Image (spheres, grey):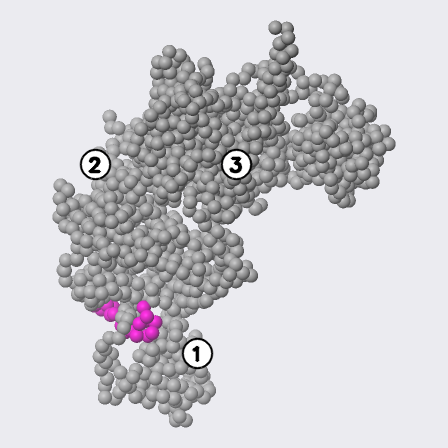
Amino acid sequence: MSLIPRLRSELALEIPEPLDEPGVFDAGVGLFNSFATRSLAISGSGHKESYMESSRDVLKNQHTFFQVFHRVINRHNCLQLRLFTAEMARQLTGIRREGDALAINNLTSGLWIKEHLPEGLDLSQLKQVLNHYEINWTEPPFPNLQRESSRYGFAELILTQQDLRKVLFSPLLLTSKLTVQTIAQTLSIEGYLQEWLLNRKQSIAPKGSRLYQPPKQEQLLFFDEQVLTPLLNVIRRATLDSSGISGDSEELLRIVQAADIVGYQLVKYRDELTRREYLVLAEKDDKPLKYWGIYVFRLGEGRPYVVQVPRPLFEVNSFEYGVALFERLQARALMIGTTHPQANFDGSADLINPNNKFSLFNLVSQALLREAHDAELMLVNTRAFAYKADKPASEADVIFSSSEGVVSRGQLGRLPQELLTKLENDGMSVQLIDGSEQTSGYEVGSTAQASYLAATANKSFAILWLSPSVRSAFRQQSENLLQAAQFNAFTIPSVEQDLGVYLQQHRAFRSKVGLDDHFRTLLTHYIAEQDVLRLQQVVDSAADNRYSLLRLIDRNSKQALLLIHDAAGIPLAVANLTAKNQATREVDLTVPLPKQAIDFINQRKAWWYRRAG
Amino acid sequence: MRRYRRIVWLLLVLGTGLWLSLPVFFAHVQQWLKHLQTDDWNTLSATVRNSLSYPVTDRQWLSFAIPEGSQQLRIITNAHIQPSQALTPNPDWTYALRYELLDHNGVVLTNGLYRHHSTLTAYKDQSGKLVYNNYYANRNILPLDGRLILLGMQPVKAARFLRVRLEAGDGVIKEAALRVYIPTKISEHQLANVWLRMSQEQKDNLAGNSIYPASLLSDEEKANLLKHQWQAVGPQGIDGKDYQTMTLYTRDDKEIGAFGDDKPLLAAGLQADAMHYGVIALPEGGGRLSLAFKALDGSALTSAVAADLQWFGRGSDRRWRHNAVWTASSIRLDYRLDGGLLVIKPTSPIIINAYLSTATEAERDISDASTAIKTYLADAGVDYNIVHYQQQPTALRVDVRRLLIAGATPLPQSLHYQCLNARQQVVADGELSALAQASLFDRVGAIIEPQNISDPVSYYFNLPAGVTGFRLLANTPDFLVNAYNQPVGFTKRQKVPEDAYIATDTQDARLTWFPLRAQNDDSLARQLRVQWLNGQYRPPEDDPDVLAGRYVWRDYIPQGETAARYLLTEYSGDAPRTDALASVYCALPVNQDLSVSLAALTGLRSVSPELIYLRDDGGPFSAELWMHRHKVLALNLMGRQGIIRLPETALGYRSLRLNTDSGGRWLMNYQAQCHGQRYLKRRVFALNAGAGLDFVVQHGAIDEVLSARWYSPLNTVERSQIQVDIDAMTTVPPAVVSTTWTNRKQLYDIRPLPSKAMPVLHTQGQALSNGELFAIPLNSDLPAGDYRIHIALAKGSPGYVMLSQTLPGVHDQRRFYLESGLEIQ
């Protein structure tokens, strides 16, 4: 029991059954802060215990400190907070739990008032929190010593489970005027996020920095109730009726304000080229960072996948692959952790450790699964495997670890199967978890995000363990200083631009000049070896063929490409300078070049040109 | 019969009562046992879970009945080891389970082998005692961490039995504890009742993976959780005969353990100790540097730590040193420093956080300026493919380092190299060695690790066209190698002054040597033969002879007819050496009595000083010079500048007075003590586009550095590019391998710095900038002989250049004097 003097209101708040009515304590503390009540009294004993020892039941026993406190402090201006139990529901409303139901349905929260309203109780403020509740000018039929000792000004607010959540997390102090930040660029979300990583590596809590601040459960519940769930509802409605989302809608503004309380901002990102839109939840720059992650939600129709990157910098290039996969799959959401797993000395920054379930990363994962209800949805974790001393390494590009356990590919569910096919279409060799030494230790296991699957239906989970060679093929080439230095040594210019746009602007592949075989062989060698002397041979051969060369960093994928132009300046071939394989993609003049460019980059093939004849 | 009815009833009632009370009894017994068990393991507040497990070996199958329609099976094993094996270094705890799924007739439907690699998780309690995550109460064996097999049962719906045994192998694992779980079947209409009858603890356990507590879960979540429970199944047969039962205890209080591997986690920042220096790179503009020291685990230092701070700016005259002491009450150590490197040498291991703030930029963390260096361990053989451009020799640089154990003296070993031709035949080979001392700057990992590395020794090869492969092989696993090459005819491009600082411009990436990937890179990576190193920038090494003034300075005159000028440039160093006083001019106050100390090279008794006047207007004026109250000079002059040679004067103190109405500045050389502005007279040569200058330099077979200065016209904004080519005047074949390398072609891209006007003598008003210095190394790889240094203006406005050399140490010098005592050169 506590007495905390407050100056703003004369209302006394009492919680007589905090132990038997779960959640009511936290809700009471929330109301105490929001209503600025004069005092808060919390009983220290449980009602059920008092069956054995009735003297501890504060609702029945005169000689409890709780009752004395009630009498002395403010008995005629008092609000008592309760939660509907089965017995109370039956006594007050006559409603009982229906046959197979897990809870009592059709209840409405109610306010029972004795004689007249407690002076300090603002009903309109209460309505702001609860939306709907019933007011009863009668006394409930069960005994309550505090009610009996107050002749007037005593109210009992009895909440349903649903309203309890509202009271727990309702931010009543929404006064600031915040808006959704809107960013529109001719840059894909992949490019936007790649640049974000490039420019803001300091936004990821480094190893040993102690910078990651594990969220408290109540912060997460608030975030879910006030930000995530409403946001996912907004996105779902907008997707269902194909309407866009207005950045200044009342609903979105409320979300933005709630997000602001925990230091987050909502950014609406629009790719002007494809007209795709996304909502990005990211920490605000002007507030101290807590390193809770960045979350991207696709607006409009997307495939039922969620791509998760729990260890972006620690597992090198898993971020780059994750953002590429997000677009490749047209996934509904992308989640990026922004902390090194060893940022904190106590291991609390490791987002995949089941002991650290209280993370925003985990909350978003659970909320996405929960809000999908019975619909299919698959979480795809992008991770990295490294070579180990004590076991042979897999020859595959990707080890595919599914929550379905050891199954053959034919037995995989629909979404994992589709994902697998997509990976293979991109030229990846994939090995499923099969009990072999190579895949041992890469099982899904008790990953924090997978552990919640038991509370869902029709959901699946997979970890894509990427090999070092695949990851290097997704490395941001804008920071490949070795390659840049090699091209600078021969004064070959480098530009950063959208590949598709560049090719379209320069009427690519319309040249009548064919690609010289010797030149192609030399450049293929260079791609494989990255030897500066090979590049010198390439430059020599280019001069012989009157080709001009341009190193282009694709803005979206951050991949480095060499564009080979004929004497008239028309691009006749494109080579991926860090290709995963030596394969060639044929130019298809019937398909728009930007689309082909995206496919070419995704496949990490070495060559893209039109064969002679 | 009737008389026994009561007794039967009584027994029945007693039996029923006993039967009903059994669960309560067992629960209490179990609780008591659990309490005992936890007490045994004492000081930890960890909660412990117990589960029944069944030992399995390679000699006997354990068989389990599976209910029809099971969707998945969970098989958890904990391999057993002997307690004496717990501290085995790098243990190989690999084992495999053979499993079979059979139908109701015992026909095998599918089988498989599942390999596991396990570990032993142990924690330290408050007293430092090791406690294990898994244990048995009554057996002297240690269970390793649990490993899971999740079997999808979709393809084998007819399976009714599971058989499992350990696969026989050579490993140390001979037994494992097995647990099998199947999905709990619960019908839809039972869900509500099951949930409501669960205790709060059971509900909380079920909701353990959810962010929400059980009381706040949605109905949907509750229903799904109830549907997705697992239940343990026991083996078929008779306990003690067909199988054994053991109680496995598992701690689930993970927070008491260390994270991940055994290596202690160090706080973020720059690590340094007495044997590993920390280097902070300050950008060109410098700024206010704040240093914070803390303990390796990030906590505040409890005792004082001293650190020697050494700052290296651009040029040997830009140095600073300070002994700093960090005490328990220190918050930060603040310094204002220009661009360069700050080397921190602490007396004990610390983490350094360095923050830089400037007038235009907010404070930012600059602690980490390390570079990652990829090297290979050479014991597995490192192969390089040697590419030749137009059949010309290829330059290859090989850096050799050695892994060193702190405190241990490495055995003298060497690294073998082979040059291979296209048929993989060895055409040349030899041995390369590494240093045996640990580097003070580079590291393998954290400073607390026992392994150090030596500084690299670079070897340079000129590989002829016939060599197509290069192989490095060591007998011991402690040689680290990496290789680089260079394009043929490569021109090294340097930016002046930017390259004196750590580059921040990633757009203008430049390298002199380009890292070469080993041909067998992938295989080496798979064999874990790739070792990344943390490299740090090295401060320049100042030559002690030069610092002590023991050097000979000489300048070079280009070949052929070239326009030359004398230029007065600012002199801001220490007091000049006496042999330089002829070229150093000191400002001379006018119209007042002065006492001037004249000095010159040892052995001379008299000199003829020069007076230089510099004026803004060219009108007439007069000047009289009095020495020891004697008028030694009286002149009527005009012009904006001029040089007057004074009569020969004995060295030592002289009283002087210069009376003049000229205005402007007067300068005089040979002054031993100077209280005004000093100037250095330099001879510079005109450099115009299209017409280069050739200097002939005699090179000994040692490392030498030529200094060049570029003087651009005053107020020039655009950069100048100076191309320097070094050509031997006699053809001597270079050595196949050497430990130094000279870049024969260099391009200096010079940014003019803001400068005062430096007067060009004999031009009546022309002025140049103060000049930008650039170095031209001639290293020992060049055979001794004469070399032509060709300097050309590749880009920018015409200016003047001079080439000089500082030869450290004491050298024989010959000087010739006329009988009058005047020095001639």
Disc 3/disc 2 C-alpha distance (Å): 76 Å
Q: Which amino acid does label 2 sit on?
A: His
Q: Report helix, strand or loop for mark 3.
A: helix
Could you tell me residue A274's position as x and y percent? 46, 30
Seen at 43% across and 75% down, the residue is: B616
Q: Which of A520 and A371 is in front in this view?
A: A371
Mark 2 neighbour class, 10 Å CA radius: few under 14, some 14 to 19, many 20 or more: few
Q: What residue type is labelled 3?
A: Gln
Letter of the chain that mark 1 sits on in the rendering: B
Seen at 44% across and 48% down, the residue is: B264
Residue identifier under label 3: B37
Which image quadrant is residue A503 in?
top left
Q: Which label's residue is closer to the chain start, 1 or 3?
A: 3
Residue identifier under label 1: B676
Mark 3 neighbour class, 10 Å CA radius: few under 14, some 14 to 19, many 20 or more: some
Residue identifier under label 2: A518
Instruction: Report the magenta residues as a range.
Output: B543-566
Looking at the figure, which quarter contains the N terminus of chain B? top right
Letter of the chain that mark 2 sits on in the rendering: A
Mark 1 neighbour class, 10 Å CA radius: few under 14, some 14 to 19, many 20 or more: few
Q: Report helix, strand or loop for mark 1.
A: loop
Q: Is residue A396 highlighted in magenta?
A: no
**Cβ–Cβ below 8 Å for labels 2 and 1?**
no
Could you tell me residue B549's position as x and y percent? 33, 74
Q: Which of B635 and A45 is in front in this view?
A: A45
Q: Is residue B269 left or right of residue B694?
A: right
Seen at 83% across and 29% down, the residue is: A114
Q: In this view, does B514 lie to the left or right of A123?
A: left
